[in-house]
Image: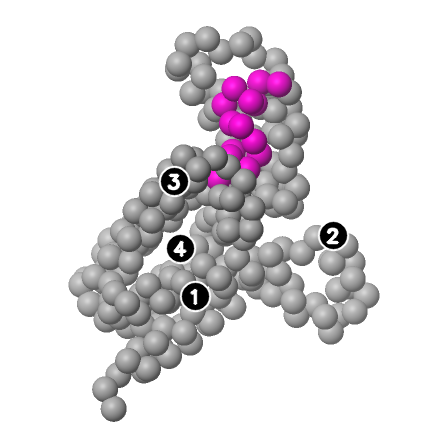
Amino acid sequence: MYPRARSQEAKLRRAEDLLDAARALAASSGGVRHITLAAVTEAAGLHPSAVRRYFDSKEELLLELAERGWNQWRDVVTAHLADVGAGDLDPEGTAASVATTLASLPLFCDLLTHVPLSLEGEVGIERARRYKTNSFAAYDAIVETLTTAGTMTTAQVRDLMTAAMGMTASLWQLSHPTATLMELYAQHPKWGHAALDFEPRLTRLLQATAVGLTRADAPV
């Protein structure tokens, strides 16, 4: 166990240790839904009571990871499109870029289910305000990058992003079933289609959405 953190630098390091432990547990235990504060503090090598000095609740800790996930996605999209010229991407290419970059961030994909379901509603208003401020700033940057790189309008890209958030939240959970569901699918193979391959399905559905959006707005 670590001694109690007294300096500000030590406190920041402890907070990062807890976040690192939560990331590792999400990856090894089957996702965010299985994370507990007790497991996080144990994995971080801290006393069970220590977590309250850094995060008021499990929800606040996970919301911090989600907020950072938005910034990571913004950076991944920027890097992914760094060599793409302005207006080079057609709607299918824009959709594929959204799907590919999301799929590269598995923890963020998992958290997208839990943020609206519980995380942002179970923290204090100022923490929720900070999450909204920073996540929307990242969202706006992603929209601008995708709009500049492709032929879709800003409004169309925003609609595509809305579809991507909803699809990701659902499809990620379906493609990562619990042990109980895996056993059930083994017994009833015809139900196993629910355990779909995440990135190909997300790409296909987002491409259909992108094409539909641009056709709907096309002059008659």
- Element carrying mark 3: helix
Mark 3 burial class by Cα count in 10 Å: few <14, some 14-19, many 20+:
few
- Element carrying mark 4: helix
Q: Is residue 28 left or right of residue 160?
A: right
Separation (CA) of disc 2 from disc 1: 28 Å
In primary-sequence order, the first of circles 2 and 3 is 3
Of all residues shown, which one is farthest toward the bottom?
Answer: 220
In the rendered structure, which segment of residues is drawn in magenta? 49-64
Residue under label 2, please give it: 179
Above or below for 53 versus 174: above
61 is within the stretch colored magenta:
yes
- Element carrying mark 1: helix
Q: Amino acid at mark 4?
A: Thr
Q: Choose between 95 and 88: the one closer to the eye.
A: 95
In primary-sequence order, the first of circles 3 and 4 is 4
**Can you say which quadrant of the picture contains the N terminus?**
top right
Q: Is residue 139 left or right of residue 199?
A: left
**Can you say which quadrant of the picture contains the C terminus?**
bottom left
Residue under label 1, please give it: 163
In the rendered image, is residue 113 in sight? yes
129 is within the stretch colored magenta:
no
Q: Are marks 3 and 1 in contact (CB under 8 Å)?
A: no
Mark 4 burial class by Cα count in 10 Å: few <14, some 14-19, many 20+:
many
Residue under label 4, please give it: 101
User: Residue 97: horizontal and vertical position, in percent?
Assistant: 36, 61
Above or below for 90 versus 70: below
Separation (CA) of disc 4 from disc 1: 15 Å
Q: Amino acid at mark 1?
A: Ala
Q: Are marks 4 and 2 in contact (CB under 8 Å)?
A: no
